Amino acid sequence: MNLLLHFHLLLITSSALFLSPSLALENLVESHHVLPRPLNILEYPENHGILQPNELDQEVRLRCDAWRFAVEANNLGPWKTVPSECAGYVREYVSGRGYRVDLEVVGEQGLKYAKELASLGADGKDVWVFDVDETLLSNLPYYADHGYGLEVFNGQVFDKWVEKAKAPAIESSLKLYEGLLGLGIKVFLLTGRSERHRNVTEENLRNAGYRNWDRLILRNLEDHGTTATVYKSKKRIEMVEEGYRIVGNSGDQWSDLLGVSMSNRSFKLPNPMYHIS
Ligand SMILES: [Mg+2]
């Protein structure tokens, strides 16, 4: 053993002899702190009950799916706005393919049913009732500027949009509409819009490609203050009293479809942005 190695061994032995146990522990704790922190430091223990970000996304999506299903199945009572947790979900749905495909299915089923009607009378008394907003015309450009249903509906601001007459057609509804005319079915438009919007509504419908409707029925002064269900039922009763057979009815609200003198078949278009009683 050379002299230098002997000196090192002596130094190590003496350090061990003079280091107290508490000092050794302190050194250990200090050395632990300078080590890199473990990567899983933010992870919660198992069964913690707190959802991770991707689980949270999934949970919100599930809840918003359930909410939308309840809307479309008419399982909810009147509601004023989209739940805030579903704001992004509704935006994604109505501006994506989901909404378009759902609309297409409704239009296709309507036309399939109409084509299968055994006897469409040649007496010109078979009619199909269409709602206008979110049924024939889409107000999506307006709702895109107003949180897709997250904001409480403002009638005055909406009227300004209506008066522009720029709402585009819902393509699948236009296809159904033209198909029905081709089958010799009359088209009656029954809308909650006010009579004072007759001209802009006609202009908008024509701009969007709709032609040859038989009637456009809007709310008179006397119809204001009633629910859509009552107002639309009253108008359907009048149609039936005139001898018309309402073979089909298309609307994005249950209040377009339910009530008295209901159609033989009703076709509910999706609309998770607003509710009308
Ligand atoms: Mg509507």
Image (tube, grey):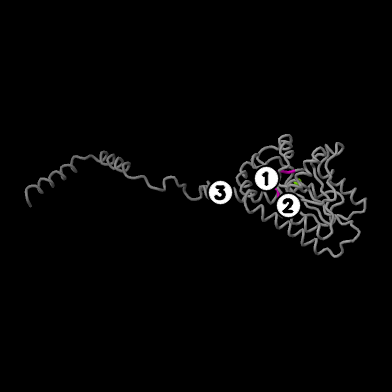
Q: In the image, is 117 to the left or to the right of 97?
A: right
Q: Do tag 3 and tag 2 residues touch (Cβ < 8 Å)?
A: no
Q: Amino acid at mark 3?
A: Asp
Residue position marked by numbered label 3 in the rendering: 57
Residue position marked by numbered label 2 in the rendering: 269
Pick the front one: 167 or 68: 167
Picture quadrant where residue 146 is located: top right
Q: Is residue 273 magenta?
A: yes
Which quadrant holds the C terminus?
Answer: top right
Residue at 64% of width from left, 51% of height from top? Answer: 65
Q: Do tag 1 and tag 3 residues touch (Cβ < 8 Å)?
A: no
Disc nearest the viewer among 3 and 2 = 2
Q: Does the closest atom of ligand 1 sit within 8 Å of the Cβ of label 3? A: no
Extent of the magenta region: 269-275
Pick the front one: 26 or 53: 53
Disc nearest the viewer among 2 and 1 = 1
Q: Does the closest atom of ligand 1 sit within 8 Å of the Cβ of label 2? A: yes
**Labelled disc at residue 140:** 1
Q: Residue 203 placed where, x, y %?
A: 77, 44
Residue at 79% of width from left, 54% of height from top? Answer: 266
Q: Earlier in the sequence, mark 2 or mark 1?
A: 1
Q: Secondary structure at mark 1?
A: helix
Q: Earlier in the sequence, mark 1 or mark 3?
A: 3
Crowding around mark 3 (Cα neighbors within 10 Å: few <14, some 14 to 19, many 20+) is few
Q: CA distance from mark 1 to mark 3?
A: 25 Å
Q: Amino acid at mark 1?
A: Leu
Q: Is residue 124 magenta?
A: no
